Amino acid sequence: MKLATFSAEGEIFFGAITDAGDAIALNADFPHYATLYEAIADGAMTDLFAVAEGRAATHSTFAYEMVMPDARRILCVGVNFPDRNAEYKDGSAQPKYMSLFPRFASGFTGHNRPLIRPPENHTLDYEGEVAIVIGKTGRRIAAEEAYDHIAALTLCNEGTIRDWVRHAKFNVTQGKNWDRSGAIGPWLVPFTDAAQLDDARIQTHVNGELRQDDTLNRMMFPIREEIAYISTFMTLQPGDVIVTGTPTGAGARFDPPKYLVPGDVVEVSVNGIGTLSNTIEDEVV
């Protein structure tokens, strides 16, 4: 069983997704939470699962929304695999510190929904990643205790407008936050075992072609270190999302580049979490 945000008949719900793929709306059981994010931020994830256990599905037909569409803090780790560092062809060794940048919830959509290519620039690219959701407040968290602060796992296609990440000398924020250019979902999977991350393999397919394929244990900055480093300068809070880094194989690194175009289908898959699938559409202006 997983947790998700979904819509049906013009309403938005949060609740559980059964192994059969049906949905169990839990809004009425938790009226004091307006959203899944509020429930996670209040530490109620276990309560959601307990109420959903054995409950009949409320919806067999529905559409996935961005899993926490009102997430307040989404922090992304850049260039976090050794082959990704080599892709830049600048001769640089592994950096001493990780690269970080913020993304906002408005830049993401849900599973089975289109990523939007804007008219201003057509260099929309994919980046398949694992995202972790913090479940326990912490500051200056020791790396060996970092996993104790994770509540759940999900997937991210950290869609990027490549030309716009080059607009400034030192930041990439403007290329990373176009409305609905990326996706997070389909759901949250409870984090219960270190092996869910330590043994995970991430793959990204575009129109069935394998483009990205790597294991999380090859990260230059493992997730334990990400949590430790980030919590040094900011208090991590329940509901915070860390997008942990993408392997080599993004479209920009092909010669010529393979940017996304309308009609493409991008699938990000991780064993034990699932598959996040999105099509591509041009923005209607």
Image (spheres, helix red, strand yellow):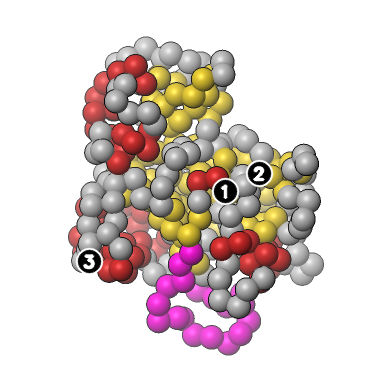
* SS label for mark 3: loop
Q: Where is residue 159 shown, x and y percent of the image?
A: 61, 53
**Residue 115 — which label?**
2
User: Which quadrant: the C terminus?
Assistant: top right
Tell me the mark number nearer the camera, choosing from 2 and 1.
1
Callout 1: helix, strand or loop?
helix
- Of helix, strand and loop, which one carries label 2? strand
Q: Amino acid at mark 2?
A: Leu
Report if residue 268 is visible in the image. no
Looking at the rendered structure, the kind of residue marked 1 is Gly
Tell me the residue at 74%/43% (across/down): 283
Question: Based on the displayed image, in which of its 4 quarters is residue 26 positioned?
Answer: top left
Q: Position of residue 107 (x, y in %)?
A: 57, 48
Give above or below for 211 relative to 25. below
Q: Quadrant of residue 164?
A: bottom right
> Magenta stretch?
80-101
Residue that badge 3 annotates: 140
Disc 2 crowd, CA 10 A, few/some/many (<14, 14-19, 20+): many
**Left or right: 141 as drawn, with respect to 97:** left
Q: Which badge, 3 or 2, comes first in the chain's sequence?
A: 2
Q: Residues within 10 Å of mark 1 (few under 14, many from 20)?
A: many
Residue 39: in sight, yes or no?
Answer: yes
How far separated are the C-alphas under marks 3 and 2?
A: 36 Å
Which three-letter amino acid code belongs to the residue tagged 3? Arg
State which tag comes first along the sequence, 3 or 1: 1
Q: Quadrant of the N terminus?
A: top left
Which residue does the image show at 63% across and 61% down from the upper left? Answer: 175
Tell me whether circle 2 and circle 1 mark residues in contact (CB < 8 Å): no
Q: Residue at x 22, y 57 (%)?
A: 138
**Left or right, 102 with reference to 136:** right
